[in-house]
Image (spheres, rainbow, N blue to C red):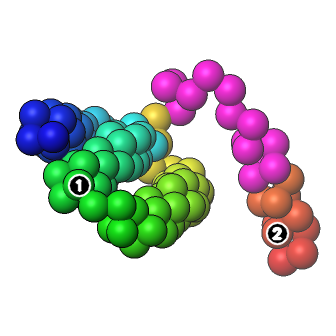
Amino acid sequence: MTIVTDVLLLVAALLTVAAGVGLLRFGDALSRLHAATKPQVLGLLCVLAAIAVGNGRWDLVPALVPVAALQLITIPVSAHMIARAAYRTGNYRGDLLTTDELAPAVEAAAQRDESQD
């Protein structure tokens, strides 16, 4: 069990380092968001799995499942809200977007605001 625990913790540490490097290296908010959310969630799941395997007790699993579930629910929601704020403030590189599906809605809202003033 120790080898499995060590491997899970090593993978978690590597994923966390990759997330940190991505946060420092990427230029715009959307790219940084990708680097912050994907490896961090996987790293946390590896740490939780290492805790479960390392202790060798099944009574810890019901305590770890809500932690994993809440992270899997809250991380995408918070990432969506940050991405939305970054888009609205223009903190993104448009040349990296394949399709900008939100641009027509933003333009329509801007025109609607101008006509009301």
How crowded pointer 2 is (Cα within 10 Å; few <14, some 14-19, many 20+) is rated as few
How crowded pointer 1 is (Cα within 10 Å; few <14, some 14-19, many 20+) is rated as few
The magenta span reads 94-107
- Identify which residue is drawn at 49% across, 25% down: 96
- Identify which residue is drawn at 15% across, 40% down: 1
Where residue 36 appears, as percent x and y from the top left, is 33, 47
Type of the residue with mark 1: Gly
Specify whether 6 is left or right of 116. Answer: left
- Residue at which label 1 appears: 56
Specify whether 24 is left or right of 96. Answer: left
- Residue at which label 2 appears: 113
Where residue 13 appears, as percent x and y from the top left, is 14, 42
Pick the front one: 2 or 75: 2
> Which callout, 2 or 1, points to the residue nearer the camera?
1
Type of the residue with mark 2: Asp
Compared with 78, 45 (above or below) is above
Which structural element holds mark 2?
A: helix
Pick the front one: 88 or 5: 5
Question: Which quadrant would the C terminus be assigned to in this image?
Answer: bottom right
Residue 101 visible at all = yes
Earlier sequence position, callout 2 versus callout 1: 1
Q: Quadrant of residue 55?
A: bottom left
